Amino acid sequence: MNTIQGIIQREYDEKLQVALKKRLQILRELEKNYSSRELEKCFESLCKARKKHVKPLFKTVEEQIEEFLNEE
């Protein structure tokens, strides 16, 4: 690798490193703030009487497990 090519490659690598650090920080913030069960908890937090009148948009974990076990 000649000197000019090495300098250009290093400059590119440095710019890429800055961009990747920004993306990594964004992903870490997303991971920290993300609750995988947040939507399910909206339904689970309802009392039994209210649950009878609500059609949930998502299956609960228990329903998903039951479906999986019944597939066999």
Image (cartoon, rainbow, N blue to C red):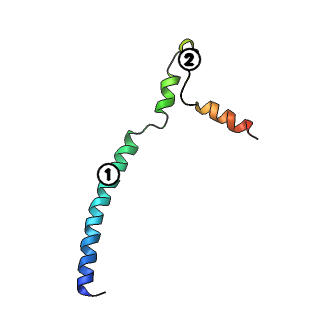
Work out how far the residue at label 1 is from the one at label 2, CA to CA, in angstroms.
39 Å
Amino acid at dot 1: Gln
For this view, does 10 lie left or right of residue 40? Answer: left
For this view, does 13 lie left or right of residue 33? Answer: left
Q: Residue at x 40, y 45 (%)?
A: 31
> Dot 1: what SS?
helix
Q: Residue at x 46, y 32 (%)?
A: 38
**Which of the two discs, 1 and 2, labels the residue nearer the N terminus?**
1
In the rendered structure, find residue 71 and report the number of the disc placed on it. none
For this view, does 41 lie left or right of residue 23? Answer: right
Q: Which residue is mark 1?
A: 25
Quadrant housing the C terminus? top right
For this view, does 60 lie left or right of residue 33? Answer: right
Q: Residue at x 26, y 68 (%)?
A: 14
Vertical arrangement, residue 62 with respect to residue 20, above or below: above
Q: Residue at x 62, y 31 (%)?
A: 62
Quadrant housing the N terminus? bottom left
Q: Which residue is mark 2?
A: 51
Residue 26 pos. (x, y %): 33, 49
Amino acid at dot 2: Lys
Residue 57 pos. (x, y %): 53, 28
Residue 8 pos. (x, y %): 24, 77
